[in-house]
Image (cartoon, coloured by chain):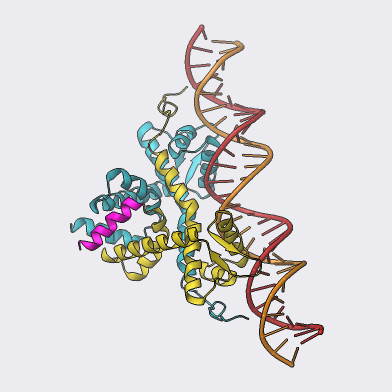
Chain colours: A yellow, B cyan, C red, D orange
Amino acid sequence: MRVTDQSISEPDLPCDAERFNQARAAQSVAVLEDYAEMIDDLIAEMGEARITDIASRMGVTNPTATKAVARMKREGLAVSRPYRGVFLTPEGVTLAARVRARHQVVLELLIALGVPAETARLDAEGMEHHVSDVTLKAFEAFLAAR
Amino acid sequence: MRVTDQSISEPDLPCDAERFNQARAAQSVAVLEDYAEMIDDLIAEMGEARITDIASRMGVTNPTATKAVARMKREGLAVSRPYRGVFLTPEGVTLAARVRARHQVVLELLIALGVPAETARLDAEGMEHHVSDVTLKAFEAFLAAR
DNA sequence: CGCAGAGTTTAGCCTTGGCTACATTAGTGT
DNA sequence: ACACTAATGTAGCCAAGGCTAAACTCTGCG
């Protein structure tokens, strides 16, 4: 063995690894969250969420949207019959509501901190998925106390 | 065609798609950024960055770290000879410095907003990769003016 | 009614980032 | 000097999220 022994002597949580694992976990649900919110938006706006509309708004091709919806169905967030629109399960609706609220808070926070609206809009997407409940509460408190 | 025509009549930027594409782009470089910073840390602490140490700290297995380093070499951020440690190119060092500085600002911002230190540590990872230069400047200004 | 075109799905490919299992190298200590 | 062990590398698997191309369904209109 070389000089070290640090690297192999951490039995449980190497302290850094923990936060990377959490970030990876957040990332793996980010897509579900975005699709849930988008489907909810489309249903509100147009009465139904079609694959083509979902794909167009997400900036992906139809097959990609189809696959994402398939995953959502597998995870119990959405339902759909072949060649029909996509709808959210109660779990999907709950998720969408939570995601939308969080998105709004993050966006408002960025703007409150002086970030230009357009930049805030772009950065909020992506950031939001990594904002925990505790952090969200802190953001809300800051916005309220402003 | 059904009721809509909204979805197919956007020639250039469907307005939503844009921000999702940016978030996806940020995500695709996030791993490079994390590894660059980690390698830089390890070199500073131990004089060299070994695959085993990188893997351990990132919370992944050795082959995963090896693959990530291979990608970094491909992208011109790192160099290494077989069975030797990993080192950063000047570009890698620059990236690491930028990432570390940004990470620090995001962490400090969260703490300044009242997020508990441990939560801040967890959330900053993941969020940081989606913080643009403009937003970073706003964060710095807020911290300075506090 | 039937058919053309829009919308949807399927098949198959690529890359990335995980993993396990196994092969190989290199450093150390006897 | 050589063997043993830790470290590294390689092969091959999987899932996710992109894509294109092609097949299939549905629907409205002539």
Query: Which residue in the rendered view is the most extreme toward the left?
Result: B146
Q: Is residue A135 magenta?
A: yes
Seen in the picture, residue C16 relative to D30 is either above or below; the reply is above
Q: Looking at this view, is B125 or A52 the one in front?
A: A52
Q: Which quadrant would the C terminus of chain A be assigned to in this image?
A: bottom left
Q: In the image, is A114 to the left or to the right of D23?
A: left
* Residue C21 image point, x, y percent: 64, 30
The residue at 37%/54% (across/down) is A131
Query: Which residue in the rendered view is the most extreme toward the front?
Result: A90
Q: Is residue A106 magenta?
A: no
Q: Range of the magenta residues?
A: A133-146
* Residue B52 image point, x, y percent: 48, 32
The residue at 26%/49% (across/down) is B111
* Residue B89 image point, x, y percent: 45, 45
Seen in the picture, residue A101 relative to C5 is either above or below; the reply is above
- The quarter holding residue B39 reads top left
* Residue B91 image point, x, y percent: 43, 49
The residue at 53%/58% (across/down) is A77
Q: Can the viewer see residue B89?
A: no
Q: Can the viewer see residue B59?
A: yes
Q: How many marks?
A: 0
Q: Looking at this view, is A77 or B143 the one in front?
A: A77
The residue at 45%/37% (across/down) is B54
The majority secondary structure of the magenta stretch comes to: helix
Q: Looking at this view, is A145 or D25 the one in front?
A: D25
Q: In the image, is D23 to the left or to the right of B72?
A: right
Q: In the image, is B18 to the left or to the right of A106?
A: right
